[in-house]
Image: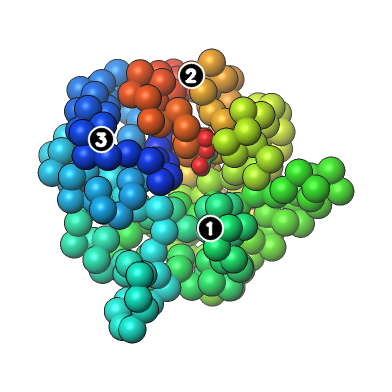
């Protein structure tokens, strides 16, 4: 059976005091989601705090982006080896907010994916269509283009140590969630694309759904055969909500 993962994306939220409470509560409640790996992707300044709070707990931590370069004159950027220094396991790559607000194109996202692998991090590659693309019937083309950029740059084998997150842009932070059927269709499409390269790899690839996942809709989404967990934004900031979503991933499949 494929691994199950629920990763929180804190985005640009938090402060030392609030993070302490959230990290302690997540750590304390993680046992309620047996068989589910739990991770939190925190803002860079709080990596040391996450590492101090979570080390040895079984809850993993990571960052929300990284530079495609390993070091050098790149003011304001953070490199993969620096994230490893802080014990990160995961790093988000190509989140739609990075693509739309900070102009990250497919080629740069692919370079960041490769940089994550070089540093020994597990990239969580985010792909997904805008509302306009969905309504124009371009969902599969969009996701395929985003995935192909990475396959071309990194090679299919690099997906062995990676996670894919399908995040329809129209569902992120909007309160509008893809139906379980819509999510399943795209997840199956992604797995099918990877299957064209390597069947075994595709069968083991962890594909998360992200986009307004809440405790109330998580179970139905996670029950779909190709949905292996979630990437959780807003609901990851409230320990009880996040833990309920993690527990739903545990119960999501028979
Ligand atoms: C995200 O930021 O990746 C996300 C899915 O956000 P939300 O859960 O708030 O829609």
Secondary element type, mark 3: helix
Instruction: Tell me if residue 13 can be seen.
Output: yes
Marks 3/2: CA–CA distance: 21 Å
Left or right side of 205 for 19: left
Instruction: Work out whether mark 1 precedes mark 3 in sequence or the reverse, and give the earlier one.
Output: 3
Instruction: Tell me if residue 196 can be seen.
Output: no
What percent of the width, then of the height, locates residue 92?
Answer: 43, 53
Q: Residue furthest bottom?
A: 73
Name the image quarter holding residue 76. bottom left
Tell whether label 2 touches label 3 (CB within 8 Å): no
Q: Residues within 10 Å of mark 1 (few under 14, many from 20)?
A: some
Left or right side of 181 for 65: left
Marks 2/1: CA–CA distance: 26 Å
Front residue (pair 74, 7) = 74
What percent of the width, then of the height, locates residue 30?
Answer: 27, 25
Residue 218 lies, with reference to residue 138, above or below; the image says above
The residue at the point 18 percent across, 62 percent down is: 85
Front residue (pair 135, 251) = 135
The residue at the point 39 percent across, 64 percent down is: 66
Q: Residues within 10 Å of mark 2 (few under 14, many from 20)?
A: some
Instruction: Work out whether mark 3 precedes mark 2 in sequence or the reverse, and give the earlier one.
Output: 3
Residue 118 lies, with reference to residue 10, above or below; the image says below
- What mark, if any, has residue 19 been given in the picture? 3
Residue 123 lies, with reference to residue 165, above or below; the image says below
- What mark, if any, has residue 98 been given in the picture? 1
What percent of the width, then of the height, locates residue 246?
Answer: 39, 25
Q: Quadrant of the N terminus?
A: top left
The residue at the point 23 percent across, 61 percent down is: 84
- What mark, if any, has residue 215 been given in the picture? 2
Tell whether label 1 touches label 2 (CB within 8 Å): no
């Amino acid at each position: 059976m494929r691994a199950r993962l629920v990763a929180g994306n804190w985005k640009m939220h938090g402060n030392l005091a609030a993070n302490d409470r959230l990290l302690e509560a997540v750590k304390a409640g993680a046992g309620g989601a047996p068989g589910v790996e739990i991770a939190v992707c925190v803002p860079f300044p709080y990596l040391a705090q996450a590492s101090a709070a979570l080390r040895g707990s079984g809850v993993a931590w990571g960052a929300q982006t990284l530079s495609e370069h390993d070091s050098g004159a790149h003011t304001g950027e953070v490199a993969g080896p620096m994230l490893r220094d802080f014990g990160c396991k995961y790093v988000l790559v190509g989140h739609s907010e990075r693509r739309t607000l900070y102009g990250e194109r497919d080629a740069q996202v692919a370079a960041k994916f490769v940089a994550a692998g070089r540093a020994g991090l597990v990239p969580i590659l985010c792909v997904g269509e805008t509302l306009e693309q969905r309504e124009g019937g371009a969902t599969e083309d969009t996701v395929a283009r985003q995935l192909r950029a990475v396959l071309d740059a990194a090679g299919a084998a690099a997906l062995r140590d990676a996670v894919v997150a399908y995040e329809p842009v129209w569902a992120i932070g909007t309160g509008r969630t893809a139906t379980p059927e819509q999510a399943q269709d795209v997840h199956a499409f992604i797995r099918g694309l990877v299957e064209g390269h390597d069947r075994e790899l595709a069968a083991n690839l962890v594909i998360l759904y992200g986009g307004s996942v809440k405790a109330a809709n998580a179970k139905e989404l996670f029950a779909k055969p190709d949905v292996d967990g979630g990437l959780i934004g807003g609901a990851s900031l409230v320990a009880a909500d996040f833990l309920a979503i993690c527990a739903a991933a545990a119960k999501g499949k028979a």
